[in-house]
Image (tube, rainbow, N blue to C red):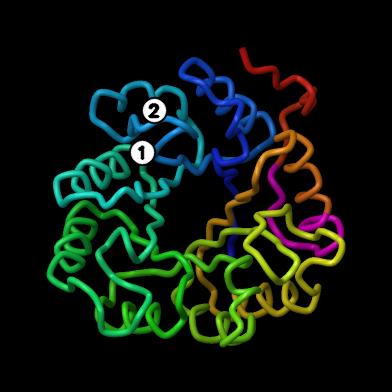
Amino acid sequence: MKIRYVVSTMVFWWREHHLSFEQECDFLKSLGFGVELWATMKGHNDCRYERRNWPRLREATCDMLVSLYSRNDGPTLNEWQEQIQCAEMLGAPIVARMESLCISGRLGIADWGFAGEVVSMAKDHNVKLCVETGSLPALVQVGERFDTIHYCLDTGCANIDPGHSFNEYVDRLADRTAYLHLTDNYGRLDDHEPPGVKGGMARANWDYLLKRLDVSGNEVIGALEMLPCLPGTMIRQSCEFLFDEMGWPNRPARLPGCDENHYRPI
Protein backbone atom coordinates (compact mmCIF):
# COMPACT_ATOMS: atom_id res chain seq x y z
CA MET A 1 0.00 0.00 0.00
CA LYS A 2 1.12 3.53 -0.75
CA ILE A 3 -0.45 6.60 0.84
CA ARG A 4 0.21 10.12 -0.40
CA TYR A 5 -1.05 13.11 1.52
CA VAL A 6 -2.85 16.33 0.73
CA VAL A 7 -4.37 19.08 2.87
CA SER A 8 -7.84 20.39 2.16
CA THR A 9 -8.25 24.11 1.52
CA MET A 10 -10.92 23.83 4.23
CA VAL A 11 -8.10 24.54 6.70
CA PHE A 12 -7.68 28.03 5.25
CA TRP A 13 -11.35 29.06 5.54
CA TRP A 14 -11.82 32.47 7.19
CA ARG A 15 -8.30 33.34 5.96
CA GLU A 16 -8.68 32.73 2.24
CA HIS A 17 -9.16 35.59 -0.16
CA HIS A 18 -8.69 36.07 -3.88
CA LEU A 19 -4.97 36.86 -3.58
CA SER A 20 -3.93 34.16 -1.10
CA PHE A 21 -4.18 30.98 -3.17
CA GLU A 22 -0.54 30.91 -4.29
CA GLN A 23 0.64 31.46 -0.71
CA GLU A 24 -1.44 28.56 0.54
CA CYS A 25 -0.09 26.23 -2.14
CA ASP A 26 3.50 27.32 -1.45
CA PHE A 27 2.96 26.75 2.28
CA LEU A 28 1.63 23.23 1.79
CA LYS A 29 4.37 22.46 -0.73
CA SER A 30 7.02 23.53 1.79
CA LEU A 31 5.53 21.06 4.29
CA GLY A 32 5.68 18.26 1.73
CA PHE A 33 1.91 18.05 1.16
CA GLY A 34 -0.28 18.24 -1.88
CA VAL A 35 -3.56 20.15 -1.92
CA GLU A 36 -7.23 19.17 -1.99
CA LEU A 37 -8.99 22.03 -3.75
CA TRP A 38 -12.48 23.03 -2.74
CA ALA A 39 -14.69 24.52 -5.40
CA THR A 40 -15.23 27.80 -3.55
CA MET A 41 -13.84 29.92 -0.76
CA LYS A 42 -16.06 30.37 2.28
CA GLY A 43 -18.60 33.10 1.64
CA HIS A 44 -18.03 33.19 -2.14
CA ASN A 45 -19.92 31.58 -5.00
CA ASP A 46 -17.23 31.77 -7.68
CA CYS A 47 -16.14 28.26 -8.69
CA ARG A 48 -12.40 27.62 -8.87
CA TYR A 49 -12.90 25.01 -11.57
CA GLU A 50 -14.26 27.40 -14.21
CA ARG A 51 -12.14 27.41 -17.33
CA ARG A 52 -10.97 31.00 -16.86
CA ASN A 53 -9.21 29.95 -13.62
CA TRP A 54 -7.31 27.01 -15.10
CA PRO A 55 -4.02 28.83 -15.87
CA ARG A 56 -3.80 30.07 -12.28
CA LEU A 57 -4.61 26.64 -10.83
CA ARG A 58 -2.04 24.97 -13.06
CA GLU A 59 0.72 27.43 -12.17
CA ALA A 60 0.03 27.55 -8.41
CA THR A 61 -0.10 23.75 -8.05
CA CYS A 62 2.86 22.96 -10.30
CA ASP A 63 4.78 19.92 -8.98
CA MET A 64 2.11 19.27 -6.34
CA LEU A 65 -0.21 16.32 -5.79
CA VAL A 66 -3.69 17.73 -6.43
CA SER A 67 -7.23 16.50 -5.83
CA LEU A 68 -10.57 18.20 -6.43
CA TYR A 69 -13.53 18.21 -4.09
CA SER A 70 -16.55 18.46 -6.37
CA ARG A 71 -18.79 21.47 -6.28
CA ASN A 72 -21.85 20.54 -4.24
CA ASP A 73 -24.33 23.18 -5.45
CA GLY A 74 -26.22 20.75 -7.67
CA PRO A 75 -23.82 20.84 -10.63
CA THR A 76 -25.33 20.38 -14.08
CA LEU A 77 -23.84 18.00 -16.62
CA ASN A 78 -22.05 20.94 -18.26
CA GLU A 79 -20.59 21.97 -14.89
CA TRP A 80 -19.57 18.38 -14.24
CA GLN A 81 -17.84 18.27 -17.61
CA GLU A 82 -15.95 21.47 -16.79
CA GLN A 83 -14.68 20.23 -13.44
CA ILE A 84 -13.79 16.83 -14.89
CA GLN A 85 -11.74 18.55 -17.61
CA CYS A 86 -10.11 20.69 -14.92
CA ALA A 87 -9.21 17.54 -12.99
CA GLU A 88 -7.79 15.98 -16.15
CA MET A 89 -5.60 19.04 -16.70
CA LEU A 90 -4.25 18.85 -13.13
CA GLY A 91 -3.91 15.05 -13.08
CA ALA A 92 -6.29 15.01 -10.12
CA PRO A 93 -9.01 12.67 -8.84
CA ILE A 94 -12.41 14.09 -7.95
CA VAL A 95 -14.13 13.45 -4.62
CA ALA A 96 -17.90 13.93 -4.70
CA ARG A 97 -20.89 13.56 -2.42
CA MET A 98 -23.58 11.23 -3.68
CA GLU A 99 -25.99 14.17 -3.86
CA SER A 100 -23.76 15.88 -6.44
CA LEU A 101 -24.41 12.86 -8.66
CA CYS A 102 -28.19 13.11 -8.07
CA ILE A 103 -28.08 10.08 -5.75
CA SER A 104 -29.89 10.16 -2.44
CA GLY A 105 -28.63 8.59 0.75
CA ARG A 106 -31.89 6.65 0.81
CA LEU A 107 -31.79 3.42 -1.15
CA GLY A 108 -33.44 3.43 -4.55
CA ILE A 109 -33.85 7.23 -4.84
CA ALA A 110 -31.54 8.40 -7.60
CA ASP A 111 -31.31 9.74 -11.14
CA TRP A 112 -29.19 6.86 -12.37
CA GLY A 113 -29.15 8.28 -15.89
CA PHE A 114 -27.52 11.52 -14.69
CA ALA A 115 -25.05 9.66 -12.49
CA GLY A 116 -24.18 7.32 -15.33
CA GLU A 117 -23.38 10.22 -17.66
CA VAL A 118 -21.04 11.75 -15.05
CA VAL A 119 -19.32 8.39 -14.48
CA SER A 120 -18.87 7.96 -18.25
CA MET A 121 -17.42 11.47 -18.59
CA ALA A 122 -14.90 10.78 -15.83
CA LYS A 123 -13.91 7.50 -17.48
CA ASP A 124 -13.53 9.15 -20.89
CA HIS A 125 -11.19 11.77 -19.43
CA ASN A 126 -9.26 9.22 -17.33
CA VAL A 127 -10.28 10.96 -14.09
CA LYS A 128 -10.71 8.84 -10.96
CA LEU A 129 -14.10 9.55 -9.41
CA CYS A 130 -14.38 8.85 -5.68
CA VAL A 131 -17.75 8.94 -3.90
CA GLU A 132 -17.51 10.27 -0.35
CA THR A 133 -18.76 8.35 2.67
CA GLY A 134 -22.44 8.79 3.46
CA SER A 135 -25.08 6.11 3.99
CA LEU A 136 -23.24 2.78 3.85
CA PRO A 137 -26.01 0.84 2.05
CA ALA A 138 -26.34 3.62 -0.54
CA LEU A 139 -22.59 3.69 -1.11
CA VAL A 140 -22.47 -0.05 -1.66
CA GLN A 141 -25.37 0.27 -4.11
CA VAL A 142 -23.47 2.94 -6.09
CA GLY A 143 -20.42 0.71 -6.26
CA GLU A 144 -22.51 -2.21 -7.50
CA ARG A 145 -23.97 -0.09 -10.32
CA PHE A 146 -20.70 1.52 -11.46
CA ASP A 147 -17.56 -0.59 -11.47
CA THR A 148 -15.27 2.39 -12.23
CA ILE A 149 -16.35 4.30 -9.10
CA HIS A 150 -13.98 4.39 -6.14
CA TYR A 151 -14.69 5.32 -2.55
CA CYS A 152 -13.55 8.19 -0.37
CA LEU A 153 -13.74 6.84 3.17
CA ASP A 154 -14.35 9.71 5.58
CA THR A 155 -13.16 8.61 9.00
CA GLY A 156 -15.28 11.20 10.80
CA CYS A 157 -18.53 10.16 9.10
CA ALA A 158 -17.83 6.48 9.66
CA ASN A 159 -17.27 7.15 13.35
CA ILE A 160 -20.71 8.65 14.03
CA ASP A 161 -23.11 6.39 12.12
CA PRO A 162 -25.42 4.85 14.76
CA GLY A 163 -26.49 2.09 12.38
CA HIS A 164 -23.10 0.77 11.30
CA SER A 165 -19.78 0.42 13.08
CA PHE A 166 -16.54 1.98 11.89
CA ASN A 167 -15.17 -1.48 11.10
CA GLU A 168 -18.23 -2.22 8.93
CA TYR A 169 -17.46 0.83 6.82
CA VAL A 170 -13.86 -0.24 6.45
CA ASP A 171 -14.74 -3.86 5.61
CA ARG A 172 -17.33 -2.93 2.99
CA LEU A 173 -15.40 -0.11 1.32
CA ALA A 174 -11.67 -0.79 1.72
CA ASP A 175 -11.17 -2.85 -1.43
CA ARG A 176 -12.24 0.11 -3.58
CA THR A 177 -11.06 2.91 -1.34
CA ALA A 178 -8.71 5.25 -3.18
CA TYR A 179 -9.15 8.31 -0.98
CA LEU A 180 -9.41 9.10 2.73
CA HIS A 181 -10.72 12.15 4.54
CA LEU A 182 -8.65 12.01 7.71
CA THR A 183 -10.70 13.79 10.34
CA ASP A 184 -11.79 13.12 13.89
CA ASN A 185 -14.73 13.84 16.18
CA TYR A 186 -16.10 13.02 19.62
CA GLY A 187 -18.68 10.51 18.40
CA ARG A 188 -21.69 12.81 18.20
CA LEU A 189 -21.18 15.41 15.44
CA ASP A 190 -18.93 15.59 12.40
CA ASP A 191 -16.67 18.11 14.12
CA HIS A 192 -13.78 17.92 11.63
CA GLU A 193 -11.17 17.88 14.37
CA PRO A 194 -7.54 16.98 13.62
CA PRO A 195 -6.90 13.22 13.84
CA GLY A 196 -6.01 12.01 17.31
CA VAL A 197 -7.91 14.45 19.53
CA LYS A 198 -8.26 13.38 23.15
CA GLY A 199 -11.63 11.72 23.52
CA GLY A 200 -11.96 11.24 19.77
CA MET A 201 -11.99 8.12 17.63
CA ALA A 202 -10.49 5.06 19.28
CA ARG A 203 -6.96 4.17 18.30
CA ALA A 204 -8.15 0.66 17.50
CA ASN A 205 -10.19 2.12 14.64
CA TRP A 206 -7.17 3.86 13.15
CA ASP A 207 -5.14 0.66 13.45
CA TYR A 208 -7.90 -1.40 11.83
CA LEU A 209 -8.23 1.04 8.93
CA LEU A 210 -4.52 1.04 8.17
CA LYS A 211 -4.27 -2.75 8.42
CA ARG A 212 -7.24 -3.28 6.13
CA LEU A 213 -5.97 -0.79 3.55
CA ASP A 214 -2.60 -2.53 3.62
CA VAL A 215 -4.33 -5.79 2.73
CA SER A 216 -6.16 -4.14 -0.17
CA GLY A 217 -2.89 -2.88 -1.65
CA ASN A 218 -4.51 0.21 -3.18
CA GLU A 219 -2.75 3.48 -3.90
CA VAL A 220 -4.51 5.93 -1.60
CA ILE A 221 -4.60 9.69 -1.13
CA GLY A 222 -5.12 10.77 2.47
CA ALA A 223 -6.54 14.28 2.92
CA LEU A 224 -6.39 16.26 6.15
CA GLU A 225 -9.81 17.92 6.24
CA MET A 226 -10.19 20.05 9.36
CA LEU A 227 -12.06 23.16 10.40
CA PRO A 228 -9.73 26.10 10.92
CA CYS A 229 -7.79 27.13 13.91
CA LEU A 230 -4.26 27.89 12.70
CA PRO A 231 -3.40 25.82 9.59
CA GLY A 232 0.16 25.10 10.69
CA THR A 233 -1.01 23.99 14.13
CA MET A 234 -3.65 21.62 12.74
CA ILE A 235 -1.25 20.09 10.24
CA ARG A 236 1.48 19.64 12.86
CA GLN A 237 -0.91 18.03 15.37
CA SER A 238 -2.28 15.68 12.73
CA CYS A 239 1.20 14.67 11.64
CA GLU A 240 2.32 13.99 15.20
CA PHE A 241 -0.62 11.63 15.65
CA LEU A 242 -0.61 9.88 12.26
CA PHE A 243 3.13 9.48 11.79
CA ASP A 244 4.81 9.72 15.20
CA GLU A 245 2.19 7.95 17.32
CA MET A 246 0.39 5.72 14.81
CA GLY A 247 3.31 4.96 12.53
CA TRP A 248 1.48 5.61 9.24
CA PRO A 249 3.75 5.30 6.18
CA ASN A 250 5.16 7.80 3.67
CA ARG A 251 5.36 10.89 5.88
CA PRO A 252 5.63 14.05 3.74
CA ALA A 253 9.10 15.58 3.86
CA ARG A 254 9.46 19.26 4.71
CA LEU A 255 11.74 21.43 2.65
CA PRO A 256 14.97 22.47 4.40
CA GLY A 257 14.42 25.46 6.68
CA CYS A 258 10.62 25.20 6.57
CA ASP A 259 8.82 26.82 9.50
CA GLU A 260 5.04 26.55 9.93
CA ASN A 261 5.06 30.10 11.32
CA HIS A 262 6.20 31.46 7.97
CA TYR A 263 2.67 31.25 6.60
CA ARG A 264 1.37 34.81 6.71
CA PRO A 265 -1.57 35.48 4.39
CA ILE A 266 -1.76 38.92 2.85
Residue tagged by mark 2?
A: 57
Which SS class for mark 1?
helix
The residue sitting at 27% across, 52% down in the picture is 74
Query: Callout 1: few (<14), some (14-19), or many (20+) C-alpha neighbours within 10 Å?
Result: many
Q: CA distance from mark 2 to mark 1?
A: 8 Å
Q: Which label's residue is closer to the chain start, 2 or 1?
A: 2
Name the residue located 39 percent from the left edge and 39 percent from the top edge.
39
Which segment is the magenta one? Answer: 241-252
Q: Is residue 238 left or right of residue 66?
A: right
Left or right of residue 157, residue 232 in this image: right
- Image position of 138 (left or right of 257): left
Kind of residue at disc 2: Leu
Q: Which residue is mark 1?
A: 90
Foreground mark, 2 or 1, reads 2
Image coordinates for residue 252, horizontal then vertical, percent: 69, 45
| Disc 2, SS | helix
Q: Which quadrant is home to the N terminus?
A: bottom right
95 over 161 or under it: above or below: above
